[in-house]
Image (cartoon, rainbow, N blue to C red):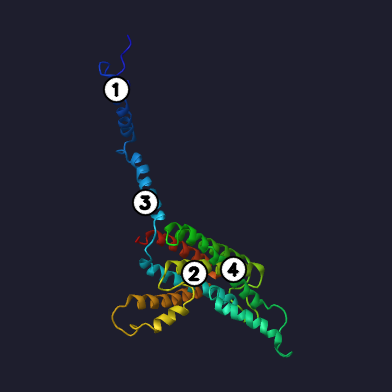
Amino acid sequence: MTSKPLLSDRGPTYNSTAPPQAAFSAAANSVPAARNGASGNGGAVDLLPTHMGRKSGWLATQLRGSVDPNKCDLIGVYGCLLTGFTSAVSFTACYVWPGFQTGNVAQLAIAMARNFDPPATRTRGFQKGDQQALTALATFWLGTSLGRIGARVGNTRRAWLVTSSILQMLMAAIAALLAHYSGESPYAADRAHPSWASPMGMGALAFLSASLGLQGIVGKRIGSAMNTTVVLTTTWVEIFNDPNLFKLRAVPSRDMRIAGVLAVLVGAFSARALLGVIGQGGTVGVLCALRVLQGMWWVVVPSP
């Protein structure tokens, strides 16, 4: 005699006397209920994709939005810190500033003028230091030209600002690899014998200069209180001509500019200290991490 299967073994049951539409609804509702019961965790697995979808939706919304230029002062100060950090690495190696192109242009002019010196002091040929100055200048041009992309996308759109930080991080990463595998010292012997004289070393200088070129146009288009965040000559002029310079109360415009100058000092000091501990490759690797942090910061800068 065969035993009848238990009711729980038959799966979902349907009322044959119910209308077809009601029977179909009952069958559809029974499947998620059975799935939740089998999971044993109250449906947490089913809620996970929904939670992730909300997070990705929030990020996409943020990237499509724009930042408020009036709320970018702190990240502008952070950009000044990155300028000091980057500059300390290249200047220690070859006495060339990757972002100070006024000095590089003047150095190239002096190099051309030396051809007219008296024979005793005349130098012939393209000296290595002058080659490095030209490399920094030319690659700075290329890096800052990427700002044309931002002009099309939107200079204050988070998608562009995050992308620019990622590009600067990639440039720093390439510079770190080139500096490490060049086998050259992170310290110049003297101005006549700079380090980073090989093609790989000069490539490291090139990518660092290009990254500051891109940073400069981003800061300029945002309208930061630190201007381009790369060259602080204008910032110094504005600080010492601020009518509230000696006021003891808080003055946001003055205080942010002073904070930018101090950030350059902190960045340069930190990079120079790290060079003696983790080397030039590791120090520029830290710069990569700082660039990633900058990109994440752009996501949460408030909207207008």
Circle 1: element type: helix
19 up-or-down from 48: above or below: above
239 up-or-down from 82: above or below: below
Q: Name the residue that disc number 3 marks.
A: 58
Q: Identify residue type, mark 2.
A: Gly
Q: Identify residue type, mark 3.
A: Trp
Circle 3: element type: helix
- Identify the residue at the far right of this view: 119
Circle 4: element type: helix
Whole-number angstrom distance, CA of label 4 to CA of label 3: 36 Å
Residue 21 badge = 1
Residue sitting at x 52%, y 65%: 285
Residue 203 located left or right of residue 21 = right
Q: Identify residue type, mark 1.
A: Gln
Circle 2: element type: helix
Q: Earlier in the sequence, mark 2 or mark 1?
A: 1
Whole-number angstrom distance, CA of label 4 to CA of label 2: 13 Å
Q: Position of residue 157 (x, y in %)?
A: 42, 59
Whole-number angstrom distance, CA of label 2 to CA of label 1: 66 Å
Q: Is residue 177 visible?
A: yes
Whole-number angstrom distance, CA of label 3 to CA of label 2: 29 Å
Q: Identify residue type, mark 4.
A: Thr
Q: Name the residue that disc number 2 marks.
A: 216
- Identify the residue at the far front of this view: 152
Residue 181 badge = none
Q: Position of residue 274 (x, y in %)?
A: 50, 72
Number of residues whose C-alpha sits closer than 10 Å to that of mark 3, classed few (under 14), some (14–19) or many (20 or more): few
Q: Earlier in the sequence, mark 4 or mark 3?
A: 3
Residue 139 badge = 4
